[in-house]
Amino acid sequence: MAEARGYRPIADYAAIGDCHGCALVARDGGIDWACFERFDADPLFFRLLDARSGAHFDMRPRGEYAVTRAYVPQTNLLRTVFRTSSGEVAVTDFMPVGRAPGAGANDYVRLRAPGWLVRRVEGLQGTVELELRVRMPANAPRMLHGDVTLEREGEEARAAFSVAAGERRFAVIAPADARIDAAVVDRLLETTRAFWREWLSYCRYAGEYPEAVERSALALKLLTFPRTGACVAAFTTSLPERIGGERNWDYRYCWIRDASLMLHALAGIGYAAEAHSFFGFLCERLAPGVEKLQVMYGVEGEADLVERILEHLEGYRGSRPVRIGNAAFSQNQIDLYGYILEGAWVYRSLGGHLSAGDRRALIAIADFIEGCWPRPDTGLWESRGPLRHYVHSKAMCWVVLDRAIRLFGARPKWVALRDEIRAAILARGRHPHGHLRQAFDEDAVDAALLQLPALGFPLDRETLRRTRLEVQSQLADGDFLERYRTDDGLRGREGAFLVCSFWLVDALLAEGEAGEAQGLFERLCAAANDVGLYAEEIDPTDGAFLGNFPQAFTHFGLMNSAVSLELYRRFGAAGIAGGYAERAKRAVRASVGLRGLAAAFFSTGRIRLRSSRESILA
């Protein structure tokens, strides 16, 4: 089975998880990546990064078969149907999750997740012969449990079994002392299905693209770590941004910027428990001092994310190096302070409470900007090349001061500095042709500039239009955009960065080009894989996914654009003005009517589904 299989396209994978760990399931039934208990744990299955010897979990029919698959509606449970000449079977893959006894309806912090991976086989028609093969280290902390007869040899376990219509079988990766039978598997499936459906029932999105928005919301929820409130950028490490290239990074950490944007996206469709949890995580990181804030952290708040190369792995399709850790944690990226203040403004605007300590930390950021905004930095794209005076970074410093003024009042020093930064951007960040540049006094542009209208940075419509057109001229290949094309200290180029195309949707709306924006959005929705997921990047020539997967950046870009389109449809240009907080308030007001925002977002609620509030293993 495995010897002839090789690597699967990234788009072949679906993601399952329990908000602590994760797994990727290929269309052919192979599980090629799985981490338990923590997203950044050593993977138990890792054939994704080494097809020669990587551990995996295969389950599929013997001989020829056809496949259809989809998530169980409104959940993160994956159902794959295999059809053979002799019959049909369905395999349901999931990682069990549920809430603790007594948890409130919006209490998704106290989750119960045993750290299991469950594969449940159900006969639908006729009889199907299946093969199972698991390879993992002999000393692994988890083992294979099931109701099939296993043959073991070293690091491998194999089984051949048949399933007739109406029959059920199961295979579970769990600790050795786990007690598992068919009744336990059935109960876990019901509990997990109820959990996901209840969580999704709080979605307030009422626009024209519910399936895409709901799938993206479910994907983002998978990427949250409830114990601390952290949110990771992706499930994987070292999936290449260009096949055979060196742009292979570990994304299993919490970027302050990415998590803040995730907060904006979820807030715009009615979720606040996640926003509340992440805000707590953020404030803990700010406690030692604003100047010590890092770009990213581990899911438990770890600060030391030293980057190492795993020489023994060949990398996805030979793309080396394979990295764990991420050296960008120590970079100077001043734009992240803008996302923090914007996140605080979103949080407060939707009814969240800022403690005295929170207020002190946010005020300290606003004061800190005075000294750091004139300096060059590495920018939001984490360049490993020379430092530059990135226009996007300067604009985010403007956002810091603008949101501080909204939160704490118009202190003269902040007002003057905000105006000074805007003047500098217009003087040195605007090209003689009228568009914004990537960096002061340079000619190149940057797709991040398309984000400025959504953040409320004040620009006239002509500058917006010229910037958008120049970004497309320099960086676009059809509907897809590269982030930049300047020297970043690395060899070769990358694919098109998918979230930038969603930023282009928002930029078109800011210009009043609603028809063009909607057409682009719908084409981008069609670029998702068959289960509605996106990677970080895409190859414009053939639509192949590149980069880590599933990617939070892409999914919250989709959600924000969907909300923007709906607000524009209802309220015109005024509906998308003023930044993420204003848009979130308008979106929630439109969906909850006269109910107060705080009640809609931060009440504990009383709606509970019995199975999802029980202990996951009760």
Image (cartoon, grey):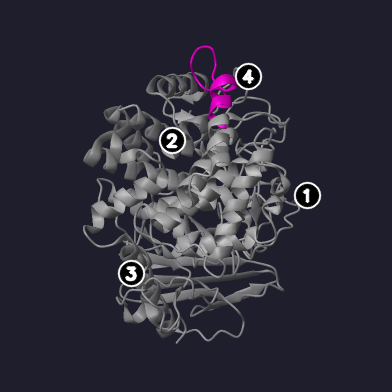
Q: Is residue 27 visible?
A: no
Amino acid beneath label 4 = Glu
Mark 4 burial class by Cα count in 10 Å: few <14, some 14-19, many 20+: some
The answer to which of marks 4 and 1 sits earlier in the sequence is 1
- Residue 456: numbered disc: none
The image quadrant that residue 494 belongs to is top right
Q: In x, y percent, where is residue 157?
A: 61, 71
Residue neighbourhood size for the residue with mark 3, other residues' Cα within 10 Å, grouped as few (<14), some (14–19), many (≥20): some
> Quick check: marks 4 and 2 in contact, CB under 8 Å?
no
Asked whether the beta carbons under mark 1 and mark 2 sit within 8 Å of each other, the answer is no
Q: CA distance from mark 1 to mark 3?
A: 44 Å
* Residue at 33% over, 45% down: 563
**Residue 277 visible, this angle:** yes
Q: Which residue is mark 2?
A: 503
> Which residue is label 4 attached to?
442
Residue that label 1 marks? 311
Mark 2 to mark 3: distance in Å?
30 Å
Question: Whole-Å distance between the Cαs marked 1 and 2?
Answer: 37 Å
> As rendered, which of 332 and 147 lies closer to the eye?
332
